[in-house]
Image: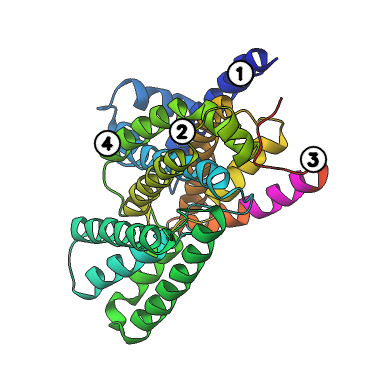
Amino acid sequence: MRQTRALVLLPALALIALVAVGAAGAFGSVVLRPSALLAGLLDPAAGMAGTLIWELRLPRAASAFTTGGLLALAGALMQVLLRNPLADPYVLGLSGGAAVGALLSMMAGLGAGAVSGSAFLGALASMLMVFGLAHGRGGWTPARLLLNGVVVASGWGAVVSFLLAVGPQAELRGMLFWLMGDLSGAGGPGLRAAVLLTGLMAAMALARSLNLLARGEVQARVLGVAVGRLRLAVFGLTSLLTAAAVTLAGSVGFVGLVVPHMLRLAGVTDYRLLLPACVLAGGSFLTLADTLARTVLAPQQLPVGVLSALIGVPVFLFLLHRGRPAATGAGP
């Protein structure tokens, strides 16, 4: 049954991903007809269509897809790590630490590369802070990680508010767009795509143990899972995935919460199938959201985080009321 579902679901999600990338190439301030889109795809030198597709839209679609995949994969891992269906990649304060690093760089007038680097260092510092504070005498527990993460995130939130209050007016718009999630200044996704692929391969190697952990810590220990080491590996992997996403697109919320839930509500609970499905669905979701962000008020662009929330909230509520309750546990 699982193999049959995988044979149907993953090709279907891959097809949706292709449609999402195709829509990103066709729509924007200038809409390309199917014939122009095909000509531009086949020949990068095919006039305006080739320039639009290969120099502007496809690189941005690749950044959006990579960011969505990173966030959705991190969300699925975070939910089983904390055994909390409401956990998402930002619950442990990683986004807050990245935001503080990025805002300080913007206030100093540094370039986009320095902003991304500072955001990564901020996320890394937050990860180490939560990791250190949560390690009590008895080791890490989901409740201890969650509580420390919430407290650290609140502290970062206060620092962000302070920086926005005292920051220069000339930088305020860029700072707010970064906080809302913005792909307009995203560079090439090459390094982050490599992080996503490596992270997915590492997560798949842990998938069987994650299925057992989702059924309960005691049962996982009885069946031979080294729970402490598994949690440590998942926490480190989730932190790196989130930091990579944040440095590419700023604070894009909701993807890591909604996408894993949507797949679970569709009956996908086995982590061997859920993890690659999250990458495909999360990437497609954010690519479509970014296309709308570039198109709705064109030539003005909206922060992609606003569109992802506007799309995700009603879809999630609809599925939640029509489907069965979502959980973090693996299916039979």
Specify the farthest residue to the bottom: 166
Distance from disc 4 to disc 1, alpha carbons, whole Å, reads 28 Å
Instruction: Give the secondary structure at mark 2.
Output: helix
Quarter of the image with the N terminus in it:
top right
Q: Which callout, 2 or 4, points at the residue further toward the start of the chain?
A: 2
Marker disc for residue 196: none
Residue depicted at x 70% and y 53%? 314
Q: Which callout, 3 or 2, points at the residue further toward the start of the chain?
A: 2
Marker disc for residue 190: 4
For disc 2, the marked residue is 21
For disc 1, the marked residue is 6
Q: Which callout, 4 or 3, points at the residue further toward the start of the chain?
A: 4
- Where residue 228 sits in the image (x, y, percent)? 46, 43
Question: Dot 3: few (<14), some (14–19), or many (≥20) neighbours within 10 Å?
Answer: some
- Where residue 148 sits in the image (x, y, percent)? 47, 65
Give the quarter of the image for residue 195.
top left
Q: Is residue 157 visible?
A: yes
For disc 3, the marked residue is 323
Q: Amino acid at mark 3?
A: Gly
Distance from disc 2 to disc 4, alpha carbons, whole Å, reads 16 Å
The label nearer to you, 4 versus 3, is 3
Give the quarter of the image for residue 106.
bottom left
Q: Which callout, 2 or 1, points at the residue further toward the start of the chain?
A: 1
